[in-house]
Amino acid sequence: MKKTDLIIMDLRQFLTCLSLCTAFALSKPTEKKDRVHHEPQLSDKVHNDAQSFDYDHDAFLGAEEAKTFDQLTPEESKERLGMIVDKIDADKDGFVTEGELKSWIKHAQKKYIYDNVENQWQEFDLNQDGLISWDEYRNVTYGTYLDDPDPDDGFNYKQMMVRDERRFKMADKDGDLIATKEEFTAFLHPEEYDYMKDIVVQETMEDIDKNADGFIDLEEYIGDMYSHDGNADEPEWVKTEREQFVEFRDKNRDGKMDKEETKDWILPSDYDHAEAEARHLVYESDQNKDGKLTKEEIVDKYDLFVGSQATDFGEALVRHDEF
């Protein structure tokens, strides 16, 4: 891939990532832009253990990995599950706690993010030292464009670089301007990290707050989602959004959203699916009820955690639902 193509690709990624950065192109007049980051569901399967453990398999492994396990025999499932347990047991004390299980489930569901980082890592780690410095990132992403004070595409690359540098510094916990893989992941996907949420809110407010007064008023809120573009009549969803702003977004009824109100809007604190699933798996597998799981307890319940084709068939025989 040419360096120019890489730069353009990465710029587009940042500009469009989860609608939290500046839009790469204008929205259509009736197209709604959604800036809200919702926690993804763990599976699109029904969570009903009386029928199947499909939801649990997707939650524990991620949907794609769960498909792989469906092709294994029970013996192969148990062997691979044992290796996974070793990874989940972060402190290597021989037990899997609810917290460790929750972290693993969140990791499984966010695998697409980590895959995205892996795909880009080698392009930015120019000296191949397993780290990415701000200088490396800046040179790859902006090096060519910063030499042109008046680019044809209309983007202000110096302004974009300042914004990226601010985010990079926020992701860089130790302040050395060198990112580990985890810090680089936080930089690319800040909405996924608690310590990065303030920068997500700040960037969002900068995008929407056109008069730069530090707040988002009703017209700025609507204007970010919808452009009249000569149309006198607003779509019904725009009218609904106006009502949402007045009734729910502007909590203190002062006619505008401050930082906390904006955070409540774009980063809602919904039900924690990973925590609920971890609690469920521990409850179902904890034979001695000590609140934590041994490898043996987990492997004994391999059909709950990972399953296999043979297991599903056996379960069907027991339940008689296939007859």
Image (spheres, rainbow, N blue to C red):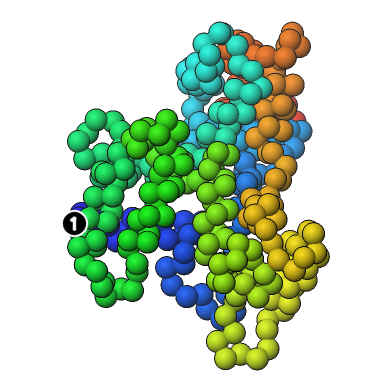
Residue 215 placement (x, y as % from top left): 64, 63
Find residue 299 and report its image quarter: top right
Q: Residue at x 39, y 39 (%)?
A: 184
| Rendered view: 74 above or below 258 | above
The quarter of the displayed image where residue 228 is located: bottom right
Instruction: Look at mark 1 in the image and give the residue it sits on.
Output: 2
Q: Amino acid at mark 1?
A: Lys
Using the image as rendered, state which of residue 89 and residue 148 is in the foreground. 148
Q: Position of residue 54 (x, y in %)?
A: 63, 37
Compared with residue 24, is residue 171 higher up or lower down, i.e. above or below? Answer: above
**Residue 182 visible somewhere in the drawing:** no
At a point 32% along the width and 63% down the height, the residue shown is 157
- For the N terminus, the image quarter is bottom left
Q: Quadrant of the C terminus?
A: top right
- Is 216 left, or right, of 175 in this rendering? right
Q: Is residue 69 above or below residue 114?
A: above
Q: Quadrant of residue 94?
A: top right
Q: Position of residue 200 (x, y in %)?
A: 54, 51
Classify 174 as above or below 256. Answer: above
Element under disc 1: loop
Of residue 51 and residue 186, the one placed in the foreground of this image is 186
Count numbered badges in the picture. Answer: 1
Left or right of 133, for residue 116: right
In the displayed structure image, the side of residue 256 where residue 16 appears, left or right = left
